[in-house]
Amino acid sequence: MIKQISFAVVFAVKLFSFSIYNLGDSRDKALLIVGGIHGDEHGGYLTPALFIQEYKILNGRVVVIPNLNTESIVVHQRGVNGDMNRKFENLDSSDKDFQTVQELKKFILNEKISTLLNLHDGSGFYLRNSRNWGQSIVIDKEIAGEVSLKNSAEGVVNRINKNLPKEHLFGVKNTETSQDSYLEMLGSLTYFAIQRGIPSFGVEVSKELDEVKRVLYHLEVIEQFLRESNISFRRNFELNEDILSQKLKDYGKVTINGNIELPLNNLKKRLNYFPLAENNNTFQFSHPLGKAIRVKNRFDIYIAHRRITSLYAQYFKLDEIEPEDIYIELDGNRTKVDFATTSSLKFKRSFKVITPPDIRANVIGYRSRGNETNIEIPSSKIERRFAIDLAETLFRVEFYRETNFIGTIILINEL
Ligand SMILES: [Zn+2]
């Protein structure tokens, strides 16, 4: 399944088992970044996800696939159906990756792709041991068509090495795929693309490095390839480990069925009695690697391979209401409620929900004998342990019409 994101300059095409994000001018030839072909290589999929959220393409075009092997990313395995990066030459139609591989091949052949980058985290350090892959730009041969892959890769390597500590320097690894010992690479994505005239490179950052460093180095390599392709871009932050570490911890939000906007940072691992529909629930994540997986009576919410929380469902029929029919007073200030965008409602001392007579509210953590609308509820009367987050500041208020569920708002109690 594919998710949508609400980032303004980006849209995700919803036809594939993986997501495709078009950034920049769609009429141009594109630099294609493929992430997540191997599901246990964090840098390889966290980097393109961050790129989609944080980079703006000013001139030219970049297409990003952050999650090619979605199924393997969630379970954090190289490939649940074997190594996908060996399946681009010949593949039996019964192979479980067949559809994904075919979709990507078709996409590459139908689009105007100027350069392809396939992102990996590789073993060790190539410059210390040439059998290793880490810290290298991988090419399948020296010349492809009229392009010297070697010269391009060396140019990128020389420029990024200027700023790297000695032990993390990159090298260019030529697998000479068509002739020698790396015969298994004939089935690789880059080799497939090169055979079709597209200059392609594997980007391998060392698995010996922590996640933040891997993303940092992947981004530095990508930026060099963008410069080489004359694609101009903007990022509104300095490229360093402190800032990247913060950004990688931001899981964003998920909008569920259009009637709950759940913030995903710092959540408790388990949320009970979570109102959902019995079937066909929709989950729209702001993070490109967000995914909801149903396991019996619960829905596990993932960002990449990390389980953020589990929603233990209580099933309801869904009902709709005009949003302007519900108000909330936060410390005496009245606001309209819109269920799809309500995770930033803040109060300090007290709040009051105001609804039409047929709408009932349930403030989770507040004990009362009856309807909880149209009464002032002081923050001191809410039991903290019912908060959805670890800091115990976020509280659910649910709305119902008779036995049907209408929506939830999340209130932030600023202390
Ligand atoms: Zn890999």
Image: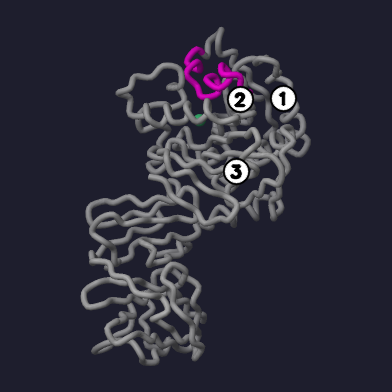
Q: Are marks 3 and 1 in contact (CB under 8 Å)?
A: no
Instruction: Give the answer, above or below, for where 42 lies relative to 278.
Output: above
Coordinates of residue 159 in the picture (x, y in percent): 77, 33
Q: Nearer the viewer, mark 3 or mark 1?
A: 1
Q: Nearer the viewer, mark 3 or mark 2?
A: 2
Q: Badge 3 is on which residue? A: 215
Magenta residues, start to end: 183-199
Q: Badge 1 is on which residue? A: 152
Instruction: Give the answer, above or below, for where 340 lies relative to 10.
Output: below
Distance from mark 3 CB to nearest ligand 1 atom below 8 Å: no
Count of marks placed on residues: 3
Q: Which residue is at the front of the view, 75 or 152?
A: 152
Kindly identify the amino acid type of the residue bearing the numbered disc 1.
Ser
Q: Residue at x 71, y 36 (%)?
A: 224
Q: Badge 2 is on which residue? A: 200
> Quick one: SS at disc 1?
helix
Q: Residue at x 59, y 27 (%)?
A: 202
Tag 1 or tag 3, which sits nearer the N-term?
1
User: Position of 185 compared to 169: left or right?
Assistant: left
Instruction: Give the answer, above or below, for where 247 lies relative to 79.
Output: below
